[in-house]
Image (cartoon, grey):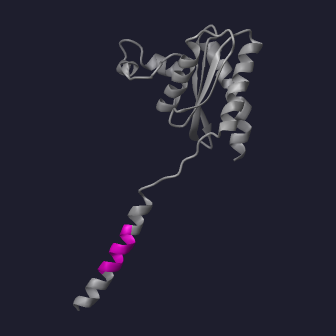
Amino acid sequence: MFRHVIIPLVLLGLTGASATAQEMTFSSRTLTTEAALAATQAALQSCRDSGYQVAVAVTDRMGNPISILRDRYAGAHTAETATRKAYTAASFRMDTTSLALETAAGEPASGIRQVPQVLALGGGLPIESAGALVGAIGVSGAPGAQADDGCAQAGIDAIQDDLDFE
């Protein structure tokens, strides 16, 4: 009798340990260096075509920089600003123009602006593939958030078909 109870319990324990080990890791998708560079170049070109000298940064899904380009006459601050916008878009999984509105002074979430590296200014957009975040892009140096957003969107548009195909 005792043996009939122990064997099923041991087997149950072994399969439970196996299931637990499988749940201890996960797989995720992120942009390749090539995709990041293509988006960066397209965004930079879009801004150039509009007469803007900017910096563009693309990050992975965790906000780590993959590609950064600064046009020759873009301000010294623009590379860091673009990187922080992309980091913020990746971190909060939303565009930074919307985040700026939601974290304005007097809003319940205004304290988010005090988090290191967060920059709640327009120009940062998340990059998605099949509904999942795979990276983010940030643009700095165009005259205003709407122009930065437009150039960032051009960068995403340049790679979106390839992302959707995967």
User: Overall secondary structure of the magenta stretch?
Assistant: helix
Q: Give the percent coordinates (x, y) of residue 141.
A: 62, 11
Could you say which quadrant of the image residue 163 lies in? top right
Left/right placement of residue 55 relative to residue 22 reads right
Left/right placement of residue 96 relative to residue 57 reads left
Count every numbered label the image shows and give the total.
0
Q: Residue furthest right?
A: 49
Left/right placement of residue 27 relative to residue 68 reads left
Q: Give the percent coordinates (x, y) of residue 101.
A: 47, 16
Q: Give the percent coordinates (x, y) of residue 46.
A: 73, 19
Q: Which residues are magenta?
A: 9-17
Q: Is residue 25 magenta?
A: no
Q: Is residue 57 above or below residue 4?
A: above
* Rendered residue at 27%/84% (across/down): 6
**Residue nearer the viewer, 26 or 65:** 65
Could you say which quadrant of the image residue 102 lies in? top left
**Residue nearer the viewer, 41 or 130:** 41
Left/right placement of residue 40 relative to residue 79 reads right
Which quarter shows the N terminus?
bottom left
